[in-house]
Image (cartoon, coloured by chain):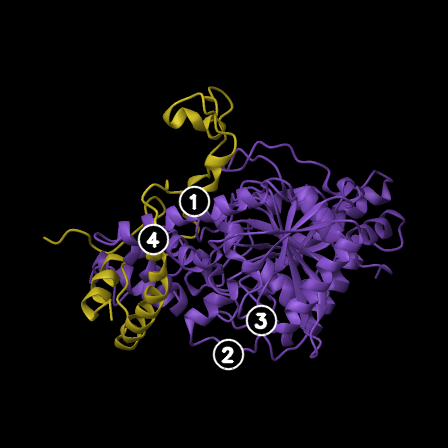
Amino acid sequence: MKVTDKDVAYVADLANLELTEEERARMLRDLNSILEYVERLSELETGKVAPMAQVSDRYGVDESRQGSDRFAYAIREDVKDGLRASLPHDVAMKNAPDTDGTFFEVPKVIER
Amino acid sequence: MPSELTIDGVRSAIAERQTTAIALAQDFYTRIRKEDSEIGAFLTLCEERALVQAERIDRMAAQGKPLPPLAGVPVAIKDVMVTRGVRTTAGSKILDNFIPPYDCTAVARLEAAGAVILGKLNCDEFAMGSSTENSAYGAVHNPRDKSRVPGGSSGGSAAAVAAEMAVATLGSDTGGSIRQPASFCGVVGLKPTYGRVSRYGLIAFASSLDHIGPFAKTVKEVALMLRTIAGRDPMDSTSAAVPVPDYVAELEKPVRGLKVGVAKEYFGSGLDPEVRAAVEAAIQKLAELGCEVVPVSLPHTEYAIPTYYIVATAEASANLARYDGVRYGFRATAGSLSQDNLSQMYRLTRDGGFGMEVKRRIMLGTYVLSAGYYDAYYLKAQKVRTLLTRDFDEAFKKVDVIAAPTCPTPAFRLGEKVNDPLAMYLADIYTVTANLAGIPGISVPCGENHEKLPIGLQLFAKHFDEATLLRVAQCV
């Protein structure tokens, strides 16, 4: 067992999940079984291999440029006129579970 | 109903005034109401929106105007793509009451091309699953054998086409979620190149692996759907500014002389003998049509599933952090706003809104990204992703397409793998590689087993070479 009860509680806390006792027990079992399977990646020597975060670095990249300038395809020209209108306030708030019409309402954040 | 329920058949029947788009949409709704109670493919029907669009098409036909390429074609959309004014759940309780204020680009492009959107299709919650049993709204049954799963996560999209409740559908594919259900339901399903189709309005699961793609009964219809939805979209910075060829016209070119790669890594232990036989027969058929079959090697294939489940869950844990009960969707509270605290509200909302598989993946993804484990898991997986992609780069120096099974087995039974997440993950063993490398992949029917269950042949091609992929697929 690699993952312990304590790890499950810690990770659930990071992920903003509470989980029932039964769910925690299942997580402990499932995470260990999946991580054990994943362990086989350590068989591979990857010391000199560059990590790949996404596929888009493989096309449209301008190799003559440096840093984020390489990804010119992803950057649009500044728009001075004719900006796309954003959603009207009332439309954006329509799905809110709780709103006073101007703001999203949430439980108290600061105790005093 | 037109004699031929294909995209072209529908369009010409409307153009020649044999039927109307409205009558056709109503026929499909009648059929859905009759058939879908036993299948469970649809979550939401949007009749009002459909009939407005159908009326617009009928007006054009009545005025003798040229009809757009998908005029009057009844389509349906996986419920992970947002639709303005039409409930979009992602198969989750946490979005049970969510009415999006805008349209997904792919959906808008279908509608602009004349398609009539009938409704939204069932899927695994947030597209996490391989059987469509993880939906908060009940499982989908395979139309070919209702005791079996339709595959997943786009099970509703595959089942709707197989049961003729839509002529074509859209699905999403993060690790095989289009190709695997296409294979299980005996239809054609395409995952395009990463960046070929805009992801704007696709509810994010794993952003570097998510793709939108079409389902239909024939390769030609899939080509037509792709031509409609493909191309640069300013709303998605990862959508590529690569020209969109006429995929339908490209189908006319001959396949003679094309090189078809076969990798032994896709024919190892665990492959059902009947699936192997059907796939090998399909490859033999391509050889008889003048393709040259060439052995290739994809040596890191066995590491694809572990790599995928680290990368996908890590991205998912970040993407799903947005569901907190504040701006939209479900909110759970212990008492009144004044009694609760914020952190408690987040937890109760996420605990009550997400299903078990989603929680499992959020937990795994949070774990592999957490302090002390990042290098060992997430960074390691990103490096192996490079190796897996290089495998394909090397292979495609020698061949035009690669042929493989889509899945190791035909459709399994409902409930068979539901309690064993690892066994379920292994159903994606032949499909996740294309998502990690970003190359296009398609599943086409290539036969049946002794129980009449469909078997799919999978083909891969180079980045942005869907034209060749579709051309070869059409010959199967």
Tell me if B123 is positioned left or right of A49 in this view.
Answer: right
Residue at x 79% of width, y 49% of height: B290
> What residue type is disc 3 on?
Val
Q: Is residue B395 above or below residue B457?
A: above
> What residue type is disc 2 on?
Gly
Please rate how many residues cluster around mark 2, counting C-alpha atoms within 10 Å: few if below 14, some from 14 to 19, many from 20.
Answer: some
Tag on residue B140? 3
> Distance between the Cα atoms at labels 3 and 2?
12 Å
Residue at x 54% of width, y 72% of height: B139
Of the pair B475 and B162, the residue shown nearer to us: B475
Q: Quadrant of residue B246?
A: top right
Q: Which residue is mark 2?
A: B415
Q: Which residue is mark 4?
A: B321
> What residue type is disc 1 on?
Thr
Q: Colour of chain B?
A: purple
Helix, strand or loop for disc 1: helix
Q: Which sits earlier in the primary sequence, circle 1 or circle 4?
A: 4
- Look at the numbered discs 4 and 2 and tell me whether their residues touch, using CB distance below 8 Å: no
Query: Where is residue A31 drawn, in percent x and y?
Result: 32, 67
Q: Chain of mark 4?
A: B
Q: Which residue is mark 1?
A: B386
In front: label 4 or label 2: 2
> Distance between the Cα atoms at labels 1 and 4?
27 Å
Marks 4/3 same chain: yes
> Distance between the Cα atoms at labels 4 and 3?
27 Å
Helix, strand or loop for disc 2: loop
Helix, strand or loop for disc 4: helix
User: Can residue A65 be seen from the camera position used here?
Assistant: yes
> What residue type is disc 4 on?
Ala
Q: Chain of mark 1?
A: B
Q: Which sits earlier in the primary sequence, circle 3 or circle 1?
A: 3
- Look at the numbered discs 3 and 2 and tell me whether their residues touch, using CB distance below 8 Å: no
